[in-house]
Amino acid sequence: MNVTTTKLNDANILASATIPRSDIDARIDKLAAQTGKQIKVDGFRKGKVPAHAVKKLYGEKLAEDAEGEAIRDMLTEAYAQAGIKQGDVLGDPMFKKYGKGADAIEVEIQLCLRPTVNTEDYKSVIPSYDEPTVSAEEIQERTDLLTAQAAPLEALTEARPLAKGDVAVFDFEGFLGDEPFEGGKADNYELEIGSGQFIPGFEEGMEGMTIGEEKRIPVTFPEDYQAENLKGKEAVFVVKLHAIKVKAPATLDDALAKKITKDENATVESFTKGIEEQLKAEKFSKLYNEELKPAITEALVEKMEFDLPENIVEQEIDNLVNQKAQSMTREEIEAIQGDEAKLNALRDEVRDDATKSVKATFIIDALATKEKISVSDDEVNQTLYYEAVMAGQNPDELIQYYTKNNLLPAVKMSMLEDKLYSRLLDLDKQ
């Protein structure tokens, strides 16, 4: 077998070989002899099946195995010639040519390597920024909002119709036609009108009711409603209003500060300081995600030049094309699938973004290594657990979903990026 290697660039090597048909035939004979010692075939003693009989039974499989063995030997020779180890190769080798002829198989395989990233002088491109400030008016506005939310509810004493923002105390029962449905009844239920907790039309139908009034409110359940028997169905709720509650006037004092923060040591002063810090954090989060983070990534990608492994870029192109396909109509997808030129045009459309994304990933990985920054699997799980709890989801189910769909590496990379950028912005020193 004649093997040659050509360095395409620092991240890609092309291995070429001519595998003679005689080489493949010899491998088939060897595999047939080995197989004959292990199998039992009627008419032959176990372990004594001749090679010609094995080839007759398993000829196609033996040929595949022989070619696979030849390719592995080819790659071993290519690694030696190029001075690389198998661990240096990223992803699967890319077959550029596999031409079967009568006398030989012509093979070209591209090996893609982890690129070398020059990490010198990378801090020079990190943008400066002004620390967000918070005005007294903003602090007061947030204070008033939290104080109002924590104010106790009081029954309305004056006679007036139910309005948005009121809390209604009422009985209700839902009917499909003349039949009540399961889960559609409750007594003395409390609901803030305008909160959107009930299906569309229900809360709007209650507006204007007076205490003691009974009313029939027609509604249509959404098509995506969780209960299968109610999806898209027209129903009527019989509602009786018992009371109207409104927020009582509230003044911020130490007691209310303790209630809002659930901190026994809270005071008006500490509560106000906490609001200021929260508002600053919110403003910086917006600044970081919308301006600083994209600016850092763009600057690093522009500054650092190195060759990229072609297979990783192609994988990212696949990902971006699949993402675009999710927003396409069935007809659009079918048109592209049946037209190679259109598919190639779509791939070219996302190639620049894919290249920048892959380049940024290698840069972040290299700089995180240089800065001795890492993200453990436990940190990833803790982050997902917290997000699930905050969203009212089952943490174990969310982690299983991310694991099943191979999304954990992307989460880890995003966390690594944020840790690195925080270091580069000196946030961990503040």
Image (cartoon, rainbow, N blue to C red):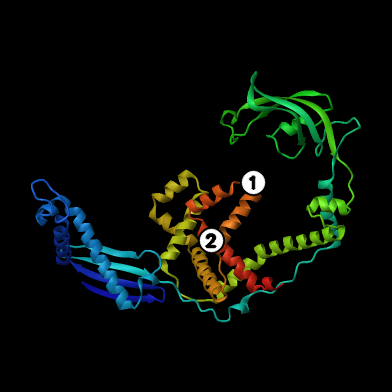
40 vs 369, left or right, is left
- Which of 415 and 268 lies nearest the eye of the viewer? 268
Residue at x 56%, y 60% (from the top left corner)? 378
Question: Which percent across, then down, holds residue 301?
Answer: 55, 72
Q: With respect to residue 242, does 138 lie above or below? A: below
Residue beneath disc 2: 377
Q: Amino acid at mark 1?
A: Gly
Question: Which percent across, then down, holds residue 49?
Answer: 11, 53
Q: Amino acid at mark 2?
A: Asp
- Which of 244 and 254 lies nearest the eye of the viewer? 254
- At numbered mark 2, what does the secondary structure look like: helix, strand or loop? helix
31 vs 285, left or right, is left
Question: Which percent across, then down, holds residue 126?
Answer: 64, 75
170 vs 417, left or right, is right
Residue beneath disc 1: 392
- At numbered mark 1, what does the secondary structure look like: helix, strand or loop? loop
Q: Are marks 2 and 1 in contact (CB under 8 Å)?
A: no
Residue at x 47%, y 61% (from the top left corner)? 316
